[in-house]
Image (cartoon, helix red, strand yellow):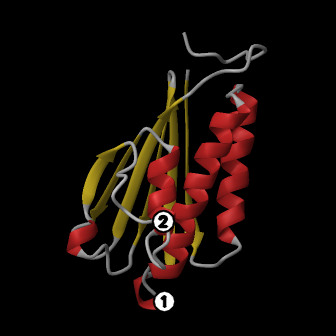
Amino acid sequence: MSIWWSLHLRREAASVPLARRLLLGTMETAGVDPDISYDLSVALSEACANAVEHAGGASTGGGYQVTAHIEGDRCRIEVTDSGPGFPLGRIRRTVRPLGRRSHQSEHGRGLFLIESLVDHVHFHNRPGHGAVVSFDKVLKWREDSLLKAS
């Protein structure tokens, strides 16, 4: 089974729950375990909130893009904006959370939360301007799922 969707959203707070609801609806329809769906939806909300806060203004189109892809037993999500990008010290790849970062600091809590909820995450800058947050998680399926990966 393969499902994917892509959204181009305005840089507005109202876009965050829209993306989250679309993801949750897709996961429920596909038969993904609700705990896994919730983790992914929180991670997506944090990535979208960062794009809303930090993405470029009207001169760059004022929006951001969300792409989600379910392939077999894995869901991959990517949030791309047109803002200034990550400071060079923030760009890294992780597998599971880095215990070194304090969740108490004022900035970066959303990135810490994303790292804590997913299996793999990659933060990087786009050529030109913009940041990309991509992450994935292995899916578990409800017993009654009709679309369970084989």
Q: Residue at x 71, y 73 (%)?
A: 14
Answer few, some or many: residues within 10 Å of disc 2's Cα (few below 14, many 20 plus, some between 14 and 19). some
Q: From this view, report whether residue 113 is shown above or below residue 105.
A: above
Visible residue check, residue 70? yes
> Could you tell me how far apart the alpha carbons at marks 1 and 2 are, in whole angstroms?
32 Å
Q: From this view, report whether residue 39 is shown above or below residue 73.
A: below
Q: Of the residues tagged 1 and 2, which is closer to the observer?
A: 2
Q: Amino acid at mark 1?
A: Ala
- Residue 72: image x %, image y %? 50, 21
Residue 59 is drawn in which quadrant? bottom left
Q: From this view, report whether residue 57 is shown above or below residue 86.
A: below
Q: Secondary structure at mark 1?
A: helix
Q: Is residue 9 left or right of residue 144?
A: left
Q: Mark 2 = which residue?
A: 103
Q: Is residue 38 left or right of residue 87?
A: right
Q: Residue at x 57, y 55 (%)?
A: 44
